[in-house]
Image (cartoon, helix red, strand yellow):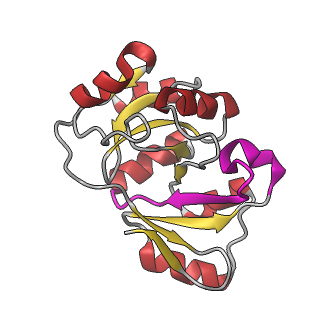
């Protein structure tokens, strides 16, 4: 399946498994509530836990009503692009389907230039690891298929990935805190 085909499918509310800059993720449009709900069901994810959203640029944060002041922008530029997901305030009720009442969201601007270019065409994607919650993240498409089978719309296979989930940094409030190293 070509990148162009995957982009078309994702724009039609599809959910699939593809490599991110860290590990395989189960992805879908972050701007479509039904797609996000489908991923929660597929992963059997705790409904109170928000998901990480991949963005193509810092300006994508505006789409979620996230205010990026100069202090925050300085910190983001230190970590991004990179394998670090940043938790930021997202008070908008419009995005409750994403923040699950926490009024915060985690975003990542991927290190891979090709993935950022892909995201520019698809729009922001929710991208939790490709696994059932509590299980080991899939390192191959075969492992992802074990979890999801034909219940996802596509798989993009680039062989084995042996990365680890992104580092998670919380920028809410005045103190920066590492949530996941």
Q: Is residue 137 above or below residue 86?
A: above
* Callout count: 0
Residue sitting at the far right: 93
Q: Which residues are magenta?
A: 92-112
Closer-to-camera residue (76/43): 43
Q: Position of residue 2 (x, y in %)?
A: 33, 27
- Tell me the quarter of the image containing the C terminus: bottom left
> Can you tell which quarter of the image residue 180 is in?
bottom left
Image quadrant for the N terminus? Answer: top left
Residue 64, image quadrant: bottom right
Residue located 58% across and 65% down the image: 87
- The percent position of residue 94, horizontal first and vertical second, equals 80, 46
Q: Residue furthest top?
A: 150
Identify the residue at horizontal 69%, vertical 34% (top origin): 33
**Residue 22 higher or lower than 140, as above or below:** below
Q: Nearer the viewer, residue 23 or 181?
A: 181
Residue occupying the point 58% across, 27% down: 38
Assess whether residue 111 is covered by the magenta stretch. yes
Task: Tell me: residue 48, above or below residue 85.
Answer: above
Q: Is residue 22 left or right of residue 36?
A: left
Q: Residue at x 28, y 38 (%)?
A: 138
């Amino acid at each position: 399946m070509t990148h162009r085909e995957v982009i078309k499918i994702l724009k039609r509310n599809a959910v699939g498994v593809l490599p991110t800059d860290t590990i395989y993720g189960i992805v879908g449009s972050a701007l479509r509530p039904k797609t996000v709900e489908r991923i929660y069901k597929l992963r059997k994810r705790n409904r109170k836990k928000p998901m990480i959203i991949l963005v193509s640029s810092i300006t994508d944060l505006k789409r979620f009503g996230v205010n990026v002041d100069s202090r925050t922008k300085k910190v983001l530029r230190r970590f991004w692009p990179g394998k670090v997901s940043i938790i930021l305030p997202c008070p908008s009720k419009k995005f409750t389907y994403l923040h699950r009442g926490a009024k915060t969201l985690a975003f990542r601007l991927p290190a891979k230039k090709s993935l950022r270019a892909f995201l520019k065409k698809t729009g922001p994607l929710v991208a939790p690891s490709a696994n059932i919650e509590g299980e080991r993240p899939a390192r191959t498409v075969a492992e992802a298929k074990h979890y999801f089978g034909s219940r996802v719309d596509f798989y993009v296979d680039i062989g084995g990935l042996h990365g680890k989930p992104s580092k998670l940094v919380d920028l809410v409030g005045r103190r920066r805190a590492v949530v996941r190293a």
